[in-house]
Image (tube, rainbow, N blue to C red):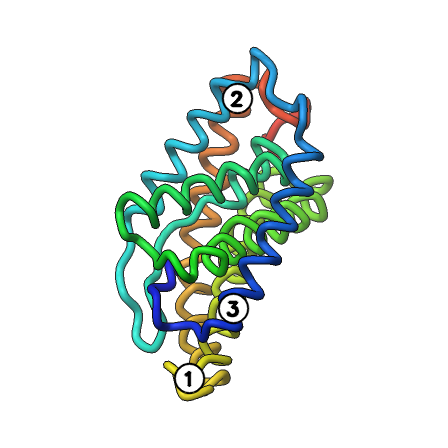
Amino acid sequence: MHIPDGYVDLPVAVALAVASVVVLAVAARRSEGAVDGERAPLVGVVAAGVFAAQMLNWPIPGGTSAHFVGGALAAILLGPHLGALCVATVVTVQSLLFGDGGVVVLGANVFNMAVVEVYVGYAVYRLVAPYSPFGGAFAAGWLGITAGALAAALQLGASSAFAYETLTVVAIMGVGHLVLGLVEGAVTAVVARSLADARPDLWPDRSGVSA
C-alpha cells in the first residue's frame, strides 16, 4: 500500500499531506498524557511490530503493493489518536530511511495507513466489540486495511499515472486487500487476544478480548 513518488498527481499529494497534518495535530493534542509508565513499553512494542509487519510487502497488479499494516491493532491497543501517531511515525521512518513509499506522497501514505485504517479500524472495533471483542478485533483488521486500500485506490485513480481509471484501480486494489484483510483481521484478533490475556492491566478495555 506504500505509494511511490510519481503515482499520485502533485495537487492530490499536497491536499492529502495537509489533511494528514491536520488530523495528526488533533491526534497529538488528544493523546497528551496518554502514555504513562505502564503503557510506555506497549507503545514501543506496537511500533516495532507495525514496523516489522509493514516491511513485508509484495506488488499487486494495477496498484502499488500489498502488505500487513497493523493500523487497527495499534488503534485497539493504544487508542485511535495514539495509534495514528504510532503508525504515522512508522510510515515516515520507512519512507525517509528505507525508501518504502515516496517522499512527495508521504502525506498520502500517512493518510491511508495512519488515518483511514486506524480510525476506521477503531470505529469497527467499537461497534462489534460489545458483542464479541475477538470478532471486533478481526473485523477491525479486515475492514480497516480494506478501507485504507480503497482510499489509496481512489487517489491513484484520480491521477494521470493511472489514466484516471478509477474504477479499474479500485476494483484491483479493493479485491486484493479485501482478501488480504482476512489474514490481517486474523492476525489482529490473535495478537490482541494474546496481549489481553498476558497483560490485562495494559488493555484499554479492562474486559479484554476473550469472547
Residue at image mark 1: 160
Give residue 165's quadrant in the image.
bottom left
Q: x and y percent of residue 197 in the render?
A: 52, 21
| Horizontal side, residue 139 vs residue 89: left or right | right
| Horizontal side, residue 127 vs residue 156: left or right | right
| Horizontal side, residue 53 vs residue 80: left or right | left
Residue at image mark 3: 150
| Mark 2 crowd level (few <14, some 14–19, many ≥20, 10 Å Cα) | some
Q: Residue at x 37, y 56 (%)?
A: 103
Q: Residue at x 55, y 53 (%)?
A: 117
| Amino acid type, label 3 | Leu
| Amino acid type, label 2 | Asp
Q: CA distance from mark 2 to mark 1?
A: 49 Å
Mark 3 element type: helix
The circle drawn on residue 197 is 2
Q: CA distance from mark 3 to mark 2?
A: 33 Å
Q: x and y percent of residue 129 in the render?
A: 68, 41
- If the image is split into quadrants, where does the C terminus sit? top right
Nearer mark to the viewer, of 1 and 3: 1
Given residues 167 and 24, the one toward you in this image is: 24
Q: CA distance from mark 1 to mark 3?
A: 18 Å
